[in-house]
Amino acid sequence: MSRYRTHFTTELGPDLVGQRVRVAGWVARRRDHGGIAFLDIRDGKGIVQVVVDPARLPQVDDLRMEYTVTIEGEVTARPEGTVNPDLVTGEIEVQASHLEILSPSEPLPFMLDDRTDIDERLRLQYRYLDLRRPRMAANLRARSRATAAIRRALDDLGFLEVETPTLIRSTPEGARDMLVPSRLRQGSFYALPQSPQLFKQLLMIAGVERYFQIARCYRDEDFRADRQVEFTQLDLEGSFWEAEDVQAAIEAALVAATRELRGVEIPTPFPRLSWHEAMERYGTDKPDIRFGMEIVDLSDIFASTEFGVFASALANGGTIRGINAGQRTLSRAEADALVERAKQLGGKGLVWMQVEADGSLRSPVAKFLSETEATGLKERLGAVAGDVLLIAADRWKTALEVLGGLRNDLGRPKNHDELAFLWVTDFPMFEEDDDGTLTFSHHPFTMPQDVEAMQRSPQTALAHAYDVVLNGVELGSGSIRIHDPETQQKVFDILGIDRESAERRFGWFLEALRYGTPPHGGFAFGIDRLVMVLQNEASIREVMPFPKTQTGVDPLTSAPAPVDEAQLVELGIQLRPEVAAALAQAEAQAGE
RNA sequence: GGGGGCGUAGAACAGUCUGGAGUGUUCGCCGGCCUGUCAAGCCGGAGGUCGCGGGUUCAAAUCCCGUCGUCCCCGCCA
């Protein structure tokens, strides 16, 4: 018999009754009745109940929660009336004949059950204990099963899994790069990849045809519930592909993962919405289509209004949009909070209206509206007594984004029981910065839908770019890539990157494009975000084994941390005086 | 960079608005009792820098200012 274990707990069932087995694991619970004691032994698969006679095995009195033990005993059917239907192994128990404590445990910093919400910093400081909790252990397993299912699906489709470097050249575009100083070339730095973008394109040029990778990516931007500085993407790319090929491959991966974790078959193809329509109807490029509350254009109703705010918005080329937020009672404080939120979302303000029982509108602006306007408004928004109507008058994008944000705040389901996958297509090639300059909206290697139209009117040009969205969460994005240097330069021209600087920054890549580059395209989606939604979690951290806090700290290892002066010297690095001074002061305070 | 929430025993909380002795609940911990529990039960006990610093006050967990930590959001995130 093996030293520690003959079976995992969940392998024990009625078919093994009468057999001597050995289980190993942690003491999840001890229920000591004096003359008899019950132990819940937890291992990597589940839990089994062990029955101990203290007269025979007095060590049971020493056991505390989370001690590791190995126990030998006979599997027996549980007595009548003591079967536990909540346990996989609830029909049987193990009558202990030998019990060995393998290692003790200190009293725990928090209880390892799912019944209370422990402070997250404490959970991260003791993540190795946190991960023993059923929910976290389930998330770890779910993630592994999801990636395994994705690998199987892509392998079946003939994809090649290729690893690309994580120490690469920094390019100033996009997110802030995480930098790694070079010792052998002092003063030079590697960057950690924001995505394997250019390498996967090089693989297409290299003839790989169908590539995928479960790739760690790094973006040095601020944290959110669904954003960490390092995260994992399913990255793929294919040659001689059009948009439909990319989307079919991504759908195959997403369907496989969803089948694995949810046991449901998502119909394909996923619904498609153009970027423009997504903005018009939902006020966002990542709409949650599980609920309605769609945005409606009210501009024509107020074309000749005497209400100054609306009139000036229209006169300035803006628009008036509204949503029907449905049946609710808006207190003055709640109404004020909505207006504040609208301002936070970038709006100049927000008009709210409560439809009263008699059909009249209670609103700070009601007195400025004509009878025709009030009627038209209610009709357009399908308003009935008890509804709350929200109206934004602003620039096109601002009005829509404000209402899109409020729509999410007010209507979004709290959980992810329902799954609504969606493609958002036909993104614009470029976005206008605050100062009016154009920047790419996807990345600079994205193929425009029409090169001539792009050169004529960059502001309105569309790209062969698309996002996949699940329940209002942007899972990822992709595009058909530019595969000839001339088109690439035309895009650079619009971005204000002249030939010389393009040559300096991307010359190696532009040269590669000249050696028979196949038309190609690809996509990447966040594994963390996908598993987060499928596991019904509100935060990406719940599906990452060792995430960081919002300030980028790992409370377990205390990373990041200062390094020895000698390490800096080797790298040819000297801290800026004000930084060194602040560090020294912090160190002095810590030493007090 | 900005807005907001939270910080009280090892853990989760109540107490803070309206200042009056570190008061309380549940879990855990320590000791005792207990042969069918599965969040076992019963009895007893220990455990507190009310995040930290300053201010107001006869008196501060409570009011004010600052600061640190953490979470959510805006900006940022090709």
Image (tube, rainbow, N blue to C red):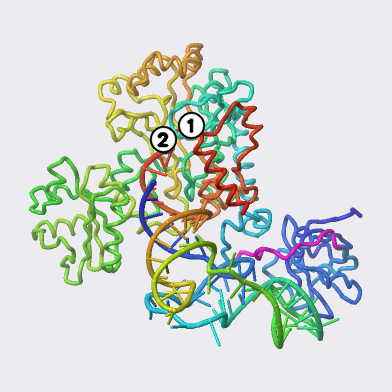
Residue A143 seen in render: yes
Q: Position of residue A576 (x, y in %)?
A: 51, 34
Cβ atoms under marks 2 and 1 closer than 8 Å? yes
Instruction: Give left or right: position of A439 versus A592.
Output: left
Instruction: Give left or right: position of A417 versus A50.
Output: left
The residue identified by callout 2 is A466
Q: Position of residue A227 (x, y in %)?
A: 49, 45
* Chain letter belonging to callout 2: A
SS majority, magenta: loop
Q: CA distance from mark 2 to mark 1?
A: 10 Å
Check the image and report above or below for A486 versus A43: above
- Camera-side mark, 2 or 1: 2
Instruction: Give left or right: position of A242 versus A141.
Output: left
Q: Nearer the viewer, residue A67 or A464?
A: A67
Q: Amino acid at mark 2?
A: Tyr
The residue identified by callout 1 is A246
Q: Which mark is residue A322?
A: none
Instruction: Give left or right: position of A401 versus A42.
Output: left
Q: Amino acid at mark 1?
A: Val
Q: Nearer the viewer, residue A40 or A249?
A: A40
Q: Earlier in the sequence, mark 2 or mark 1?
A: 1
Q: Position of residue A499 (x, y in %)?
A: 38, 14
Which residue shows up at 21% across the image and 57% down it?
A: A351
Q: Residue A128 occupies which quadrant of the picture?
A: bottom right
Check the image and report above or below for A584 versus A535: above
Q: Position of residue A287 (x, y in %)?
A: 38, 47
Residues shaded magenta: A101-114
